[in-house]
Image (tube, rainbow, N blue to C red):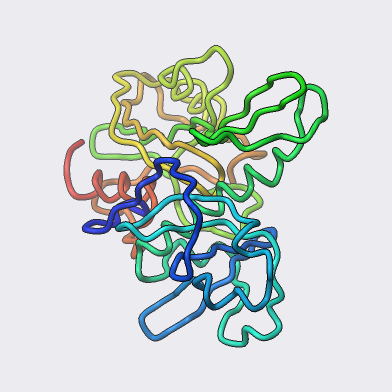
């Protein structure tokens, strides 16, 4: 999956030490990131490659994380015109671009970029938020409000019935690949209750024997995905929520379509069921 970058290691401890010339600079604009494409994959600029474009580069930065001891920082403003070897690419590139550890760094940085961008002012009193020196937290000096990075819990659900699994396609999305039932956890709800509710809402089925599989950080939507398998409880007739899904159907294990994609928890769960009992 997208976070499986071994033997490389992303260290997300907050250590806001100043950057040096060899530190990596991550720069984003809306849904795009500044990268260099090479025969080996993608690269990010180092501070020494950008310093001539912004005199305040070494003062205006946010520490993000390190990968194998190399530090990554968020930078705010640069002039890209002299950087012909770099280009702004849609962040969807991080789904499959090599090397995988750089893609994971890029999309994780993008998640933090979005959080910092929408937390500039206090949601309680409107004053400017300040960076804490010891942890990744923003605080308001006026009212003492504290904000931490946004993480949204959600479930991926493999509904099974003996040798069959329920697969679906989302409504109104360009990506027409098969997926599993999914949804965000609501206030006051356990993740197991989320599983049962989402299945009932989207396909009108009851489930039982809900069992946890594994989790995945999914920075594209600020989400922590939690995968579950569960068994059909009763009738298998599908009542489709057409606002959420374009279709949903049962697939025998042997008829599940192959997928070349390995970045998502959804695809791993589908292939795990295809290759044997879960």
Instruction: Determine the image quadrant of residue 201.
Output: top right
Q: Is residue 5 above or below residue 119?
A: below
Q: Nearer the viewer, residue 89 or 77?
A: 77
Which residue shows up at 24% across the image and 39% down it?
163
Where is residue 171 shown, x and y percent of the image? 62, 48
Between residue 145 and residue 58, name the one nearer to us.
58
153 to the left or right of 33: left
Residue for point 29% across, 53% down? 9
Q: Residue at x 36, y 33 (%)?
A: 159
In which quadrant of the rendered view does residue 255 lie? bottom left
In front of the other: 131 or 188: 131
Residue at the outermost right position = 126
- Residue that appears at 68% across and 71% down: 54
Q: Nearer the viewer, residue 126 or 53?
A: 53
* Rendering coords of residue 230 (x, y %): 32, 27
- Residue 150, compared with residue 109, is above or below; it is above
Q: In the rendered view, would you say 171 is above or below 73?
A: above
* Relative side of 211 to 106, left or right: left
Q: Quadrant of residue 101?
A: bottom left
Residue 42 placement (x, y as % from top left): 44, 75
Quadrant location of the C terminus in the rendered image: top left
Q: Where is residue 250? Give x, y as percent.
A: 39, 42
């Amino acid at each position: 999956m997208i976070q499986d970058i071994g033997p490389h290691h992303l260290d997300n401890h907050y250590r806001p030490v100043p950057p040096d010339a060899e530190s990596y600079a991550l720069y984003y604009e809306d849904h795009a990131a500044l990268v260099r494409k090479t025969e080996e994959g993608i690269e990010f600029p180092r501070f020494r490659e950008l310093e001539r474009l912004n005199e305040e580069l070494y003062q205006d930065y946010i520490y993000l994380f390190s990968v194998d001891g190399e530090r990554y920082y968020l930078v705010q403003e640069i002039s890209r015109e002299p950087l012909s070897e770099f280009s702004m690419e849609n962040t969807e590139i991080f789904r499959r671009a090599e090397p995988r550890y750089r893609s994971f760094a890029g999309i994780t940085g993008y998640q933090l970029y979005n959080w910092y961008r929408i937390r500039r002012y206090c949601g309680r009193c409107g004053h400017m938020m300040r960076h804490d020196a010891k942890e990744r937290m923003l605080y308001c000096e006026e009212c003492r409000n504290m904000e931490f990075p946004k993480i949204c819990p959600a479930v991926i659900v493999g509904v099974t019935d003996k040798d069959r699994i329920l697969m679906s396609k989302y409504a109104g999305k360009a990506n027409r690949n098969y997926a599993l039932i999914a949804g965000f956890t609501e206030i006051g709800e356990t993740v197991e209750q989320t599983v049962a509710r989402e299945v009932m809402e989207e396909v009108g089925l009851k489930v039982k024997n809900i069992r946890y599989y594994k989790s995945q950080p999914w920075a594209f939507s600020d989400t922590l995905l939690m995968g579950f398998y569960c068994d059909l409880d009763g009738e298998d007739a599908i009542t489709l929520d057409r606002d959420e899904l374009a279709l949903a159907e049962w697939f025998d294990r042997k008829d599940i379509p192959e997928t070349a994609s390995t970045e998502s928890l959804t695809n791993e769960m589908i292939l795990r069921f295809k290759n044997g009992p879960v």
